[in-house]
Amino acid sequence: MGIIIFLQILSIFIGFLCMETNGSTLVHQALEVQCKESEREALLKFKEGFKNHFGYFSSWKAEEDCCQWERVGCNNETGHVIALDLQGDKGAVTLQLQGEISRSLLNLTHLSFLDLSQNDFNKIQIPEFFGSLSSLNYLNLSNAKFKGTIPNQIGNLSTLQVLDLSGNGFSLTANNLDWLRGLSSLKFLDLGGVDLSKDSHWLEAINMLPSLKELGLFACKLQNLPDSLSYVNFTSLEVLDLSLNSFNSSIPNWLFKIGSGLVEIHLRRNQFHGLIPDAFGNMTSLVELDLSENNLQGHVPKSLATLSRLTVLNVAWNSLEGIVTDVQLLNLSNLRVLELSSNQLAFDVSSSWIPPLAGDCRSKLLQSRATISKLAPNSEKPFFHRYLKIRNFRHCAKLVLESLSGSSVHESFFQWPKRECA
């Protein structure tokens, strides 16, 4: 989700920390002072809590300056430790930390960057004392096999800008999100896979985060989704992912009051029903829109034709019906993925129609275009287009047409190239 925004945020911290990245190792530049003795001792105590050291701590030697240790970053003016990049390797068990997290981290009073993601903490709880690391701007505990209730103390981290607790095997829970109210500086929040089924007021807590740019709440067992808010406070939002929940409602009105800055909206498999709102057409900054695998009905709104920046449009596996014309797709010149499959849609396109696809493959599609007959139904029985997919592979678009049923289709329709372009 929103990887570009995430990398932008991360680059801010890397620049602030005055460090360079070499593989997964943070290396301090132009040291003028050595690290503080008390902080070196704190790091050595922290190291002792782990059963497996492997290559993580090979450079962590008591007789050497801890600012020279791998995965440690220091302020080059004060010598204080300000970063620990201990991200593991999700694909290699031998490169994942296992053990206990020592409270000695509390002696790193200037620590602003802590990444313990992709390790194996064997279903331990997130330590409550993390809430006392008051200088933290960045905390990443994703895919690290934590379990239990997220401690409310995390809400004490008033300077936190990035919080990622996603991917912990659906083992984390939160009775509510009230603790988020103390994180007014938060820009990136990912709680994907955290069980939030007990919190019926989660949206009110999110609405107290005015600086939030990216929100990930996919597969959180959410059920309650208010249709409206008295006011919308998180108007800086650019990426929203609420996929894989169980709202069983219509698409809420407050979504269209966030502002015109939304770039990505992911609402897949949420049991949404009703019509696709025309108001999506006002979100002129949208690049990705995923409404697939819901129970949406009615027509594909003509207003979507105004979203000229769209690269991904996915409304597959709904109950949409009606006619889609080439005119509706004309302005979508940046499309790389178009998913309309498993709906009851008819296509009315001229014989000269060419999909407005972006990418290096477009000229090849122009050269190999087949003649496509007009596909709108001539009878009351609709033409069911079960599977239409336009997808990009390495900057090369392709069109796949299959599983057609319903009224007869001109033979030339099947002559569209089905191979992935080279």
Image (tube, rainbow, N blue to C red):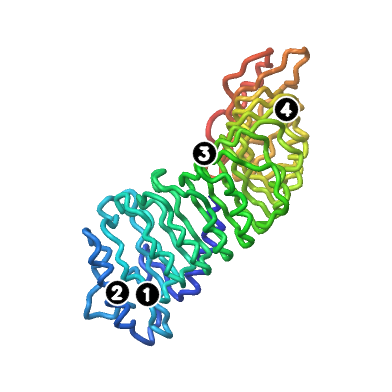
Query: Which quadrant of the view contains residue 38?
Result: bottom left
Mark pair 3, 1: CA separation: 53 Å
Is the residue under label 1 in contact with that under label 2 (CB below 8 Å)? yes
Q: How crowded is mark 3: few (under 14 residues within 10 Å), some or many (20 or more)?
A: few
Q: From the viewer's perspective, is the residue at label 1 or at label 4 nearer?
A: 1
Q: Mark 1 belongs to which amino acid?
A: Leu
Mark pair 1, 4: CA separation: 57 Å
Q: Mark 4 belongs to which amino acid?
A: Gly
**Residue at the spot of label 4:** 298
Mark pair 4, 2: CA separation: 62 Å
Q: How crowded is mark 4: few (under 14 residues within 10 Å), some or many (20 or more)?
A: some
Mark pair 3, 4: CA separation: 38 Å
**Residue at the spot of label 3:** 422
Q: In this view, does 421 lie to the left or right of 231?
A: left
Is the residue under label 4 in contact with that under label 3 (CB below 8 Å)? no
Pointer 1 or 4: first along the chain? 1
Q: In this view, does 31 lie to the left or right of 161?
A: left
* Residue 273: image location, x then y, percent: 66, 31
Secondary structure under the numbered disc 1 in the rendered image: loop
Relative to residue 90, is residue 387 depicted above or below?
A: above
Pointer 3 or 4: first along the chain? 4
Relative to residue 15, is residue 23 depicted above or below?
A: above
Q: Mark 3 belongs to which amino acid?
A: Ala
Q: From the viewer's perspective, is the residue at label 3 or at label 1 nearer?
A: 1
Residue that extends furthest to the bottom in the rendered view of this protein: 32
Q: How crowded is mark 2: few (under 14 residues within 10 Å), some or many (20 or more)?
A: some
Pointer 3 or 1: first along the chain? 1
**Residue at the spot of label 2:** 42
Q: From the viewer's perspective, is the residue at label 2 or at label 3 nearer?
A: 2
* Residue 245: image location, x then y, percent: 54, 38
Q: From the viewer's perspective, is the residue at label 4 or at label 2 nearer?
A: 2
